[in-house]
Amino acid sequence: MYPGPDNRSFSAGIWMFGQFVDRFASDGYGPAVSMPEAIRSAAKVGGIESLDLNFPFWGDETSLAAVQSALEGTGLRAQAITPAIYTREFCRGAFTNPDAKVRQKAVDLIARATDVGLELGVDYMKIWPGQDGFDYPLQADPRRLWELSVEGMRNVASPHPALKFAIEYKPKEPRTHMLFSSAARTLLAIEDMGLDNVGVLIDFGHSMYGGESPAEALELCLSRGRLVDIDLNDNFRSWDDDMTVGSVHPVETLEFLLGLKRAGWSKPWKLDQFPFREDPVEAARASIRMLSDLLDVADRIDLEELAAARERQDALGAQALAFDVLFGRSKETK
Ligand code: FE
Ligand code: FE
């Protein structure tokens, strides 16, 4: 319905078309959805060309062949695989689990997921060690958690030097403290890993509620050549609300998009949302429409003038350059 211009493509995490469960509605906010069904929902959006798929695929019976046939049937592509190293089995940690056998299970699961990813021809493997961290003061030795996380990532990424592994950082949830909690910490850990094929996925919402400026986090990752991908969504800055793009912070989203544009971003603009009470197809369309509009605005901002205003660190001048376009101000009404 809202296909982007020719040079713009969009992708999405498949979970936004699945069933949502939280600690209140533990019976789910809707019926269970199989992965092939979710792929078909994603295809209905219009404009989405590729997907980040959870692995194992949802539903005991969902085979790789079933997913491949849903992808072929809809013309969508697998962009990434996210191994589920955050489920019950790993609730005390994946890479940092106190039990060495569970740590090995996490590495084995990612290895299996990577084989599937290679089969599907993904661009990268997404690693979200959401259960790696701690909850209480005194609970764990921070130095040991760091060492185990670095070692775990090294174990999964080193056998596949030609494939990218992107760490998605997040400040908290489900743990009160996640180990890869910010762009800077993740980049430092990547330095310790000493591998060229590990990078960062910046989730705009995680960056926002982690107290970062996403545009600043972006430059940090770009300057070290470690940006693999982005997740786009929005929130109220106190939680990972995963709302539609630009619904709360359109100006900071625009700033983030301007940074990506300057970097020559040519990959799909990726959605990561949890529309608990909204229709997922409509929520994806709302995000794509907003992204298309913000990218149009970014295209119309005079980047040389913006650079000059920033050189002067002229807050009002730089904002006016964006707001003139955003609100369609003409010279006469200024
Ligand atoms: Fe995300
Ligand atoms: Fe998230």
Image: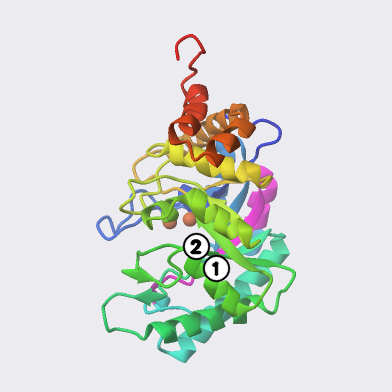
Specify the amino acid type for callout 2. Answer: Ala
Looking at this rendering, what residue extends furthest in the front direction?
A: 312
Q: Residue 276: x and y, percent?
A: 36, 46
For mark 1, give the secondary structure. Answer: helix
Residue tagged 2: 183
Residue tagged 1: 187
Is residue 303 visible to the viewer in this orientation of the structure? yes
Specify the amino acid type for callout 1. Answer: Leu
Question: Relative to residue 316, is residue 291 drawn left or right?
Answer: right
Circle 1: is it few (<14), some (14-19), or many (20+) Cα within 10 Å? Answer: many
Q: Please tell me which residue lies in front, 211 or 20.
A: 211
Magenta stretch contains residue 87: yes
Q: Residue 69: x and y, percent?
A: 67, 53
Quarter in which the N terminus is drawn: top right
Question: Magenta stretch?
Answer: 66-88
Question: Relative to residue 120, is residue 57 drawn left or right?
Answer: left
